[in-house]
Amino acid sequence: MLVSLTVGKVDAGVTVLLTPDKRLIEFPSILLPPDISSGSIVDITVARNTTSESAAERAFRALQDQIYAAFGTAEPVAPVLRCRNATQTSVVLEWDPIQLATADLISLSLYRNGQKAGNIPKPTAMHSTKISGLAVDTEYGFHLVLRTTAGTYASERVQVRTHKMTDLSGITITTGILPAPVRENLTRAVERIGAKLVDGVRIDTTHFVTTEGRGIQWERANELNIPVVRPEWVEACEKNGRILGVTKFYLDALRPTGPPIEDSNNRPGTAGSSATTVTPAQTQKELPPDPSASSSNGANDAEEAAARRKEEGGGGSVDDEDDESSEEDEEEPEDKVRSGGGHDEQKIRADERDEQGLAVRPKQPTVEDDNASSEGDDNNGYSSLGANPPGGKSPGDGSSFQDVAL
């Protein structure tokens, strides 16, 4: 079909053409002859090219088939779940990498006994998980559910039974720094109980056995909260024929560093006294003054002074006698206590210390007086046992054995 058009405005990019019925058509200037100007008339022939249409159609269909073959025939695949390891209270599950084809991932969920246990974080990168806190010797059912934009796909159900306490086959051990003999003994013990030794810390590692807290594997075990125990734990499990707790076998657990402390109350000949070591500084402390001894000695001295005055003919008043006796009382208690009522008790306690094997200073010769012996009789024998009389205080009240000066 031939069409005649009048050239209107000519521009560098677009030329305005006028139709016979006065319509405007914008036409690319590059497709017009180079010598045209405003007012020129151009003839344009318009026809359909069916051959080119058929070729373009064939090329488009081929491209569609190629795209469909590459991305349209594959579909997401249901996950394949299996049990990697089981212990008394935990299960390690693993699965093949998920295949999504051209679909987009929505979620990957784990179900336990038909109930949703939770979503798997980073499902395209993680291919295993560990479930802890299970009951001993109990059967559980697990399966995965994959949700995508192309549909929902569920895995086969996996039945897992946790082990009994006497079943040690689920123990998986990774070793750290061990002496050669200890490592050999540990390897043989692991074989005997049916456990497994693996290289490197993995998700199914149940215990990390070492004698030294250092190294890359030790650090990784701490990051994964894997119990770090000594080799004695494996020996104890083998000896008892069952899995044991790890609290007493932690690498950083406190161990006894000496013989147990004996209770001196159970030893004969100690009269219920506690075995306390007496230091030299403690043995130098003096016994506190005995109030009863001081008062009794002061009264006797006052009577003797009054008698002497009467014999000599001195006629002092009662007040003067009391003043003189009180002055003598203030000067004498220290010497009288050291040689008086407290000495028997000191001597008895010193004898008790000798029986207990405690170090004491050499005994100093002292002078005993009648007041001390009578005072011991009044206590009805309590002083000889190192105890206080009922309802009263002994010279050593308020002081422990460390405070007594011998």
Image: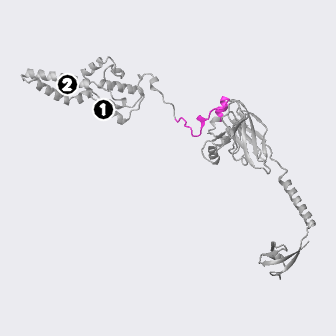
Name the residue: 14% across, 27% down: 323
Q: How crowded is mark 1: few (under 14 residues within 10 Å), some or many (20 or more)?
A: few
Q: What percent of the width, then of the height, locates residue 120?
A: 70, 43
Name the image quarter holding residue 296.
top left
Find numbered disc 1 in the image and state the secondary structure of the residue it sits on.
loop
Q: What percent of the width, then of the height, locates residue 152?
A: 78, 43
State how far apart marks 1 and 2 are (Cα).
Answer: 21 Å
Report if residue 72 lies within the magenta region: no
Q: Mark 2 points at which residue?
A: 298
- Placement of 151 over or under 262, stated as above or below: below
Name the image quarter holding residue 20.
bottom right
Name the residue: 57% across, 40% down: 252
Task: Pick the quarter of the image with the C terminus.
Answer: top left
Residue that protrudes farthest toward the bottom in the picture:
35
Left or right of 127? Residue 281 is left
Name the image quarter holding residue 156.
top right
Left or right of 18? Residue 277 is left
- Placement of 181 over or under 125, stated as above or below: above
69 and 381: which one is in front? 69
Whether residue 5 is visible to the viewer of this picture, yes or no, is yes
Start and end of the magenta stretch? 234-257
- Amino acid under label 1? Glu
Q: What percent of the width, then of the height, locates residue 123?
A: 72, 46
Task: Pick the quarter of the image with the N terminus.
Answer: bottom right
Query: Which numbered disc flags the more N-terminal residue, 1 or 2?
Result: 1
- Amino acid under label 2? Gly
Q: Mark 1 points at which residue?
A: 286
Report if residue 235 lies within the magenta region: yes
Name the residue: 51% across, 34% down: 258
